[in-house]
Amino acid sequence: MLAYIRDRQGQQLALTIGIVALIVIFSLLPMGRLLQEVVLPGGTLSLDIIRNGLFSETTWVATWNTIVVGLGGTLFALVLGVAVALLVSLTNVRQRQAFVLCFVTPLMIAPQVTALAWLQLFGPSSPLLNILGIAPPLGTRNPLYSPEGIILLLGIQYAPLVFLIVRAGLRKLPRELVEAAQSSGAGWFRVLRTIILPLMTPSVVGAAALTFVSCVGNFGIPAFLGIPANYLVLPTLIYQRLAGGGPAVLSDVAFLSVLIGIIAMFGIVLQDRIASRRDFRISSTSLPAAPYGLGKWRPLVETGMWALILVILVLPLVGLILTSLVRGYGITLTAETATLENYAFVIFEHAAARRAFGNSLYLSAAAAIFAVFVAIPLGYVIAWGKQRWIKVLNLAVELPYALPGVVLAIASLLLFLKPMPITGVQIYNTVWIILYAYLARFLILAVRPTVTGYFQLDRALEEAAQVAGAGLFTRMRTIIFPLIAPAAVAGGLLIFMTALCELTVSALLWSSGAETIGVIIFAFEQGGDSKYAAAVSAIMVATTFLLMLVASLFANRLPDGVLPWRD
């Protein structure tokens, strides 16, 4: 009996040590190294880096631009996302599932692909506008090369994020409160203003904070739309300084990364302060509120919904696909001029593009597989652990994803600029440093659905096995893993889709031979080869749709809420 107790304690200790080691390696260590570079460069206390950064006019201009597009994109995403969430959740519109799938799709597509699609829709070389005969003259400035263009696309990119968070809150809306107000004679607008929106304040504020962090840390959209207009935000300023100065400017860009982190954390802290000023708890739970009948207005509202999908999804993708079929800049697309040579070039002829496809597939698959196997024991501890340090553990796991990706990228550069101690292994300027950043940044995407799966799982089987004498690892292997694997695999699929065309992290970490698909798209567009960039982007959009379809086929076997585009 004593030996059994010792074995049980030893397995629990081994699991705890393993999880803590992973958190230190992938979360605390890079962030600590970043702060050290700013405050203790070379191991000695110095404020020179902070002083130089604060007295730089370029830094303040980029900071102001970052705040402007961050707030603007957040406001636009909030208005659009909240409106769509209210419409879908509280009314009797038809084809709800198909609409949600289409509306959420921009969130699944990489930001640089979104930016490229919109640029090809409105630019003077737009094949679609040329076909319609309304294209502006060649050489005309694209109207999206502006702060307003960046705000527009950031809002479209992250409106689905707001929608998902607010819709989740609306599902918990107590039906009796709404029905009581309606029976008292309150109209739909008064119910919305006095009951629904006040109760949705935590969801709306939380969505605003997460959207603001996403907008501030976004690199793809400001890079595609801001760099040509010389409108720099902090992520693009870091990219330009690294591209021009290399490792010599790491201390300077470390300060800029911390500055981005401070701006992002300010948004999160402000959200907590707003949410804590009032008590939004609901004393009872019930079925969701009955859908509000639109009556004769329903056809008109549904037409407006699908017109929105046409504008934010269909037309940009059509512009992207048509651009991928043209032979050259400004050529009108016809049946005679259309070609698949651009696809053949990026798939078979361009060496860097071929490497990028292979590297991105490998990196995405490796990150997804790693996250699935780590998320199961980690989720076990987070969901069912009772220790006080569990909350700290959860925050540490979320830290690399909560902060903008550029912060983690710079931290990874600083951490691996020199060979690793003891082993002497050098991963700087290799594909392995990108893999490290992916593992750190995207782990939480597998942990969240896994924890959700644990909360929905009856623990009786695991407890029965424990009473029967099964050790922790035996229970994990024979009971927990088979039951929780679908949720973890769904999280892994989300990681694969997110990492496959990622740019924010890889733009700062790639090197010759370690290109990724996001980097190749960016390089083609910056080099003026929009047709090749469009071809690669079209391939990735098709891949994303295919993966979403495959995941949807298994939706019935997954816990509720794991796939964001499914009810």
Image (cartoon, rainbow, N blue to C red):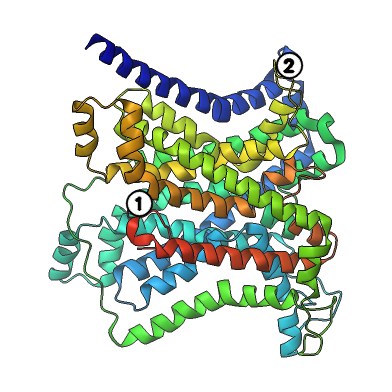
Q: Foreground residue, 287 or 490?
A: 490
Q: Foreground residue, 212 or 419?
A: 419
- x, y percent for residue 102: 48, 70
| Displayed quadrant of residue 536 | bottom right
Which structural element holds mark 1?
helix
Residue of label 1: 201
Q: Foreground residue, 119 or 278?
A: 119
At 37% across and 73% down in the image, what residue appears?
A: 96
- x, y percent for residue 393: 43, 28
Mark 1 Cα within 10 Å, few/some/many (few <14, many 20+)?
Answer: some
The quarter in which the C terminus is drawn is bottom left
Total marks in image: 2
Which structural element holds mark 2?
loop
Q: Is residue 206 above or below residue 181?
A: above
Mark 2 Cα within 10 Å, few/some/many (few <14, many 20+)?
Answer: some
Image disc number at residue 46 = 2
- x, y percent for residue 21: 51, 23
| Displayed quadrant of residue 173 | bottom left
- x, y percent for residue 306: 47, 79
Sequence-earlier tag: 2 or 1? 2
At 45% across and 57% down in the image, what residue appears?
A: 162
**Camera sees residue 226:** no
Q: Amino acid at mark 1?
A: Thr
